Image (cartoon, rainbow, N blue to C red):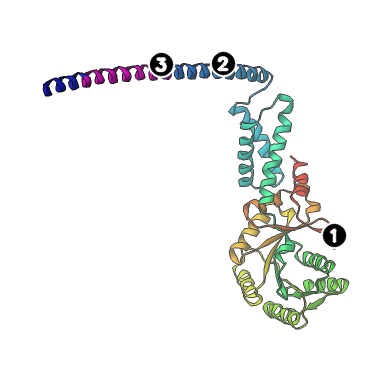
Amino acid sequence: MFKFLRRSIKKFEEKLEREIEEALKREKDVGREERDEKIERSIEQELRQAMETRKEVEKLVKKREEKVSIDEEKLEDLFWDLELNLLEADVALSVVESIKESIKEELKRANYSRRELKKIVREALQRAILHVLKKNKADFLELINTNKKPFVILFVGVNGSGKTTAIAKLAYYLKQMGKSVVIAAADTFRAGAIQQLEEHAKRLNVKLIKHDFGADPAAVAYDAIEHARAKHKDFVLIDTAGRMQTNVNLMEEMEKIKRISKPDLTIFVGDALSGNDAVEQARRFDEAIGIDGIILTKVDADAKGGAALSIAYTIGKPLLFIGTGQKYEDQIPFDPEWMIKNILGNV
């Protein structure tokens, strides 16, 4: 009886195994069929997408039949003319190279026709210049927005840059804002500078602190700050003797004035008419004593405007004001949009 049961169980197990194998085979076949169907659908979809893409490419090709492309040699010819124009506008060579590379990238991405080429180049040039100018733009009002009294501003620059006049114009600007101002005549090496500031101080009705001709400039700056502190004045503007950036002794004297006065802001005053010389001057002053911002004078007489662009790019210091005339109100906060119109008018 047990033998019969064992044989029966064995047959059942064998039958069960065959059924399981057949079931697995059927499931495998079904899975294979499903995979094949998925592959077929995927291939059909890829083919359909490929056809659609091809149609779109054909449309683009038709559109581009009227477009032009400029080879590298033609690009170089184009940029050679542009480079000459910028250099003639007193833009420093390093700045020209940077702008040129920016425009190249713009043109690589641009889609243009022959009629549009000039417009595209000009727009690319405008964007490149604006990038340089806006990168180093600062709001003067934000810089002086502190509770410190007095707020001390030290002015530096070379002879003939218009520094004394720039100080008077800034005093006028601050007075228009309702601020009180003290001017320090710390250019004691030139009697004419003291007299010039005296005249401005009378017209503007501001306090002038001066010593005798040849006195210690640092002492004048110190007395002006102490007077402003005692009288609760808002600002002290310190004039200094015009110094050539290569004169080591005069630069050391400037360092002494800065050490004594501890200015909150050091402004370099540059002459726009001096072109790239203004860039080198600003660099030397920054290396010697450190400058925080720039006032560019005589911009109204500079038909090129390249000095502003070169200083903004090379020195990396913000242009705060530009001089646009002889009147006190003719020193305006620097506006990149205003300046770019001057530069592009010559390029």
Q: Which residue is more in the foreground, 175 or 80?
A: 175
Report the side of 45 relative to 276 (left or right).
left
Question: What is the quadrant of residue 112 in the picture?
Answer: top right
The dot on residue 326 is 1
Q: Earlier in the sequence, mark 2 or mark 3?
A: 3
Could you classify mark 1 by the number of other residues whose Cα lies within 10 Å: few (under 14), some (14-19), or many (20 or more)?
Answer: few
Reply yes or no: does residue 33 show up in magenta: yes
Residue 18 point in image, percent of width and height: 25, 17
The residues bearing labels 1 and 2 have C-alpha atoms spaced at a distance of 70 Å
Name above or below for residue 211 compared with residue 163. below
Dot label at residue 33: 3
Q: Secondary structure at mark 2?
A: helix
Looking at the rendered structure, the secondary structure element under dot 3 is: helix
Q: Is residue 130 left or right of residue 37?
A: right
Specify the segment rendered in magenta: 12-34
Circle 3 or circle 1, nearest the eye: 3
Does 52 lie within the magenta span?
A: no
Would you name the residue on which mark 2 appears? 51
- Could you tell me which residue is drawn at 75 percent across and 65 percent down? 163
Q: Is residue 174 visible?
A: yes
Quadrant containing the C terminus in the rendered view: top right
Q: What is the residue that sits farthest to the bottom in this orientation?
A: 230
Distance, label 2 to label 3, CA atoms, is 27 Å
Asked if the residues shown at circle 3 and circle 1 are in contact, with their CB atoms under 8 angstroms apart, the answer is: no
Where does residue 166 sit, x and y in percent of width and height? 78, 64
The percent coordinates of residue 182 (x first, y second) are 78, 75
